């Protein structure tokens, strides 16, 4: 998927919303499986969002069955809603043949459009993911969690480390194969980030349960192509714990990250 196609979806749906499929069996209504829950939420929210982001930890925790559910969820999205942008929230970060295998896993075996990456081992963790046309590496730059300041905002040569990471990754990529994670709770940094990173899409988690403001993110972070995928997970998935969970998820999606 190209950034022009993503932009077209943003304009068509008047939305920047990415729905995080962080599906926790302990939080589901009685008697419904993870897969059936995912399908119901997808059916209800697809008209109001442009992307879905399964968090792999919630599937890996279920063992082989979780991997099967993940594959079936991706297949369901591809068959029913092929316009949606699919992100594997994996935060992988390795080099060499291992990174190549991760890229093959998410881009060929599972047919995701993008995968989140942890860049701590350098650009070698990223470059294997840039070899697939129409696919994206999404590098964690400035995350929403409180302890992100431990490393991401440390100074190197007068710059915060997250800026060093972003600029280095931009040297070996283009906006057509590279995105960055910037947390919604760091919305005040978006204006500065757009000064040195004007064209790349940003995946922005932290709206809703984590306290981030979609309005502030849009005001400071949107660019000529929209340039934002604003993620909400718990605020949509668990808008209701009852049998009306899908209806309430749709209502939450309609209210979140709208233009």
Image (cartoon, rainbow, N blue to C red):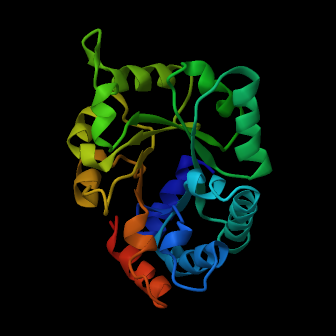
Identify the residue shown where x is 28% and y is 52%: 217
The x and y percentages for residue 225 are 43, 50
**Image check: 14 left or right of 112?**
left
Numbered-mark total: 0
On the question of residue 254 being in view, the answer is yes
**Image check: 103 left or right of 253?**
right
Residue extending farthest to the bottom is 243
- For this rendering, which residue is in front, 77 or 121? 121
Up the image or down, 223 lies above or below 178; here it is: below
- For this rendering, which residue is in front, 213 or 238? 238
Residue extending farthest to the right is 109
Quadrant of residue 142 within the rendered picture: top left
Quadrant of residue 176 within the rendered picture: top right
- For this rendering, which residue is in front, 142 or 9? 142
The x and y percentages for residue 12 are 47, 69
**Image check: 58 left or right of 148?**
right
Residue extending farthest to the top is 157
Identify the residue shown where x is 66% and y is 22%: 95
The x and y percentages for residue 28 are 52, 77
Quadrant of residue 213 within the rendered picture: bottom left
Up the image or down, 197 lies above or below 62; here it is: above
Up the image or down, 118 lies above or below 236; here it is: above
The x and y percentages for residue 72 are 74, 66
Identify the residue shown where x is 53% and y is 63%: 21
**Image check: 180 left or right of 84?**
left
Up the image or down, 67 lies above or below 48; here it is: above
On the question of residue 132 being in view, the answer is no
**Quadrant in the picture for the C terminus:** bottom left
């Amino acid at each position: 998927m190209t950034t022009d196609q993503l932009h077209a979806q943003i304009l068509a749906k008047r939305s920047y919303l990415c729905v995080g499929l962080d599906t926790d069996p302990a939080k589901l209504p009685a008697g419904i499986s993870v897969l059936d829950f995912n399908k119901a939420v997808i059916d209800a929210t697809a008209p109001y969002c442009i992307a879905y982001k399964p968090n792999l930890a919630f599937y890996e925790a279920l063992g082989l069955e979780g991997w099967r559910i993940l594959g079936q969820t991706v297949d369901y999205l591809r068959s029913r809603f092929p316009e949606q942008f699919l992100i594997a929230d994996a935060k992988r970060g390795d080099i060499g043949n291992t990174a190549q295998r991760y890229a093959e896993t998410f881009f060929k075996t599972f047919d995701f459009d993008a995968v989140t990456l942890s860049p701590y081992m350098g650009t070698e963790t990223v470059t294997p993911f840039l070899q697939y046309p129409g696919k994206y590496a999404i590098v964690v730059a400035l995350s929403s969690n409180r302890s992100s300041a431990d490393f991401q905002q440390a100074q190197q040569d007068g710059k915060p480390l997250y800026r060093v990471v972003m600029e280095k990754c931009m040297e070996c990529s283009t906006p057509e194969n590279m995105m960055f994670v910037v947390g919604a709770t760091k919305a005040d940094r978006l204006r500065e980030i757009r000064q040195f990173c004007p064209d790349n899409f940003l995946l922005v988690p932290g709206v809703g349960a984590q306290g981030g403001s979609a309005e502030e993110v849009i005001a400071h972070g949107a660019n000529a192509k929209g340039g934002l995928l604003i993620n909400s997970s718990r605020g949509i998935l668990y808008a209701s714990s009852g049998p009306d969970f899908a209806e309430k998820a749709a209502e939450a999606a309609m209210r979140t990250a709208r233009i």
